[in-house]
Amino acid sequence: MSDFAKIFKAYDIRGVVPDELDETVAESVGAAFARLTGAEAIVTVHDMRTSSAPLAEAFGRGAAGQGADVVAAGLGSTDMLYYASGSLGLPGAMITASHNPSKYNGIKLCYAGAKPVGQDTGLAELRAMAEAGVPAGQGSRGAVTEKDLLGGYATYLKALVDLSGIRPLKVVVDAGNGMAGHTVPRVFQGLPLEVVPMFFELDGTFPNHEANPIDPRNLRDLQHGVTEHGADIGLAFDGDADRCFVVDERGGIVSPSVLTALIAVRELAREPGASVIHNLITSRAVPEIIAEHGGVPVRTRVGHSFIKAEMAAAGAIFGGEHSGHFYFRDFWFADSGMLAALHALAALGSQDEPLSQLLAQYSRYSASGEINSEVTDQAAVTARVRDEFSGRPGVSMDELDGLTVSGPDWWFNVRPSNTEPLLRLNVEAASEAEMITLRDEVLRIERGHDDTRETA
């Protein structure tokens, strides 16, 4: 019997197949989800992993057994599920483990209109129902109908970003053997783009590199491809293609904060004075640039459930995270790596400068990237950091998410992982030298004791 406590995470369900997550579990979750939502119909999408189609079918059987009709959309990205949920007005399930290794799979869930399902919004209740066993449904079984939504998804995205009149661009796309290999050809169809495909073959064993572009090691192939082909831009997607990372024409990795600022400026030009969400790990340049362009920056915790809730509350037009997730009001407040990619292409193609020059105005500070330290007592180590910086002139602190310590031209955040004994450190300063000095000081405080050590 599966350990439900282990596979039910903060925002989704994820585990090793078949030891922790198998078709029996998926069928139970499908039945429980139909009960939880009370929906007459549910839509399912799945990624390219070998286990994904059988798990999607099992989920559908569970839902249909409770009398819910099932729209089986087949292969797609996570943001295609959000499109399906939003456009059809149905709750939905995406079978994917995103960027996790091939032995894993998972289930991401949303209510109708792509509204998130997390621990505080139904996932805990769903777990209890599935764990206890869902009684057989009363009445007739629901019908399972296959429906191809890829064309509608592509058309909808291109209606949200004006790509008319852009100059021809050469684009290298690294799909990482994930779902972008399925969605990019249809979305980019008809655009003035010369696409150089990398790893478009759908392969859930990820034979070339992990489909996790937040790790710079997984961008090396794309960087080489961009410079080798003399491309204007490189795009990398994760396994379920809901995150996008960008590489400029020189092979330089573009910070997601820079891309957040670029898209925010574009969206504010369309709707002056709108609110834009950014999490507390994004560069200080992001709220500065939002305000300079007449927008209202809204700072939030890390995590898509917090971003989506804050976006809905503020009616924000756009939101960005340091992890490569980008959220759009006109996409049901949901995240879409493909929409972010289209914005980058539209911005680049509507003027003549190379991407590195276009983005230079959005990069103002030097950042460390996320650094993990393994600790046995996260709270005690965080308290040491707080004590070391408390009372210093010009220093302020807040605990919106972990501990953020801010100075006149620098800041850092230390926050605990929800799932591992790790502290995550992010540092930013006006200069590289200042960032390095601050980074090393905080790491010495964190790691200068027996209960900490560096981890990847």
Image (cartoon, helix red, strand yellow):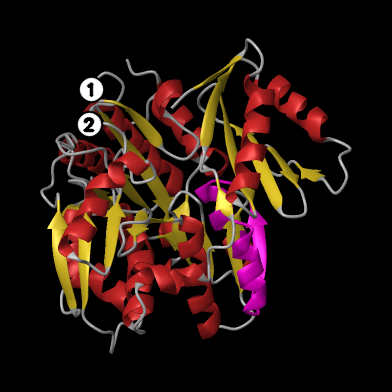
**Residue positioned 61% across, 70% down in the render:** 289
Residue 148 seen from this side: no
Q: Amino acid at mark 1?
A: Pro
In the foreground, 90 or 68: 90
Q: Residues within 10 Å of mark 2 (few under 14, many from 20)?
A: some
**Residue on which the image places disc 2:** 102
Q: Position of residue 245 (x, y in %)?
A: 36, 55
Asked whether disc 1 touches disc 2, contact meaning CB atoms under 8 Å apart, the reply is: no
Q: Residue furthest front?
A: 433
Is 67 left or right of 376, judged from the image as shown?
Answer: left
Q: Position of residue 222 (x, y in %)?
A: 24, 52
Of tags 1 and 2, which is closer to the observer?
2
Residue 18 disc label = 1
Is 188 left or right of 405, judged from the image as shown?
Answer: left
Q: Residues within 10 Å of mark 1 (few under 14, many from 20)?
A: some
**Residue positioned 57% across, 46% down in the render:** 302
Helix or strand or loop: what does disc 2 sit on?
A: loop
Q: In which quadrant of the rendered image does the C terminus lie?
A: top left
Q: Quadrant of residue 387?
A: top right
Q: Position of residue 450 (x, y in %)?
A: 63, 10
Q: Position of residue 89 (x, y in %)?
A: 38, 64
Residue 420 seen from this side: yes
Q: Amino acid at mark 2?
A: Ser
In the foreground, 141 or 455: 455
